[in-house]
Image (spheres, rainbow, N blue to C red):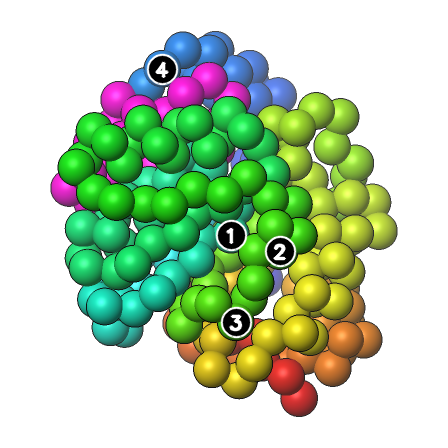
Amino acid sequence: MFRKAIRKSIKFVVDPWLRWSYNRYASKDLNIDFFGCKIVVQPRIFHPGLFFSTKTLIYFLKTIEVSGKTMLELGCGTGAISVWAAKMGAEMVASDINPKAIENTRINALNNGVSVKTVQSDLFTNLIPNEYQIVIINPPYYAKSAATIEEQAWYCGVEFEYFHKLFEQLTEKSVDTVVYMVLSEDCDLEKVYSIAKLYSLSMDIVYRRSTILEKNFIFRIATI
Ligand SMILES: C[S@@+](CC[C@H](N)C(=O)[O-])C[C@H]1O[C@@H](n2cnc3c(N)ncnc32)[C@H](O)[C@@H]1O
């Protein structure tokens, strides 16, 4: 409780400055080392090294078998996770609504000498959930409308429209497709649970990671 209050006040005080610094920092191509992969982060694409959620997904994936699995990263951003998983032997497909993220992912796959199939798609619109054994998602979760396609990396819509559409599409999946989604304690988890329930889906925590600044959870999404 006390930790949460301190954390919120720190974020509240420094947020505008952090946002300004981040926008400046992220206005050009950045080269980072991400779990042994050389990753270019192109301007305004979600930075996988700066936020806890992407790393939490990697730590989780290290605990399960990905080699030889057909896997989809839905909303791939730079494609850093897809490149890492392809290196680990997964048969990777990476999708995103943002064509610049698709381009960024292609460059990173090429630079790391791995094969990642890319598909531009609004959630599953151009994809079939049952073609994958594992689907991983690091969703946008702030309750605000995105003004640009880049802002869709952060904002899920005032009424959490992203989750309504995602969960509706996931009702079509078979039991053989396992879906994992990372969420932070900063997200309105109760709201997301309640939307999942509307579509008869359950969300069970299968992995947790805490840092001094944030707690992240990996949820397994299944049909009730
Ligand atoms: C939080 S970022 C995560 C990026 C990457 N998976 C990672 O972990 O570093 C969310 C990503 O989802 C994409 N996205 C947002 N809405 C989407 C939608 N409706 N369909 C597909 N991708 C979407 C964004 O463009 C962004 O690249």
Kindly indicate whether the residue at mark 1 contacts the one at mark 2 (C-beta within 8 angstroms). yes
Instruction: Return the mark for residue 29.
Output: 4
Q: Amino acid at mark 3?
A: Asn
Element marked by disc 2: loop
**Lower sequence index among marks 2 and 3:** 2
Disc 2 packing (10 Å; few <14; some 14–19; many ≥20): some
Q: How far apart are the two marked residues, 2 and 1, measured between alpha carbons? A: 8 Å
Which residue: 46% across, 11% down?
27
Q: Which residue is mark 2?
A: 124
Give how far across and how far down residue 140 sits, in percent: 61, 46
**Residue that label 3 marks:** 130
**CB-based contact (under 8 Å), mark 2 and mark 3:** no
Q: Amino acid at mark 2?
A: Phe
Question: Which one is earlier in the sequence, the residue at label 1 or at label 4?
Answer: 4
Mark 3 to mark 1: distance in Å? Answer: 13 Å
Q: Secondary structure at mark 4?
A: loop
For the point 18% across and 57% down, the residue is 88
For disc 1, does the CB lie below 8 Å from ligand 1? Answer: yes
Residue placed most toward the observer, 16 or 156: 156
Residue under numbered circle 1: 74
Whether the magenta-drawn stretch holds residue 88 is answered as: no
Q: Which residues are magenta?
A: 31-49
Image-quadrant location for residue 203: bottom right
Q: Are marks 2 and 4 in contact (CB under 8 Å)?
A: no
Query: Which marked residue is nearer to the observer: mark 4 or mark 3?
Result: 3
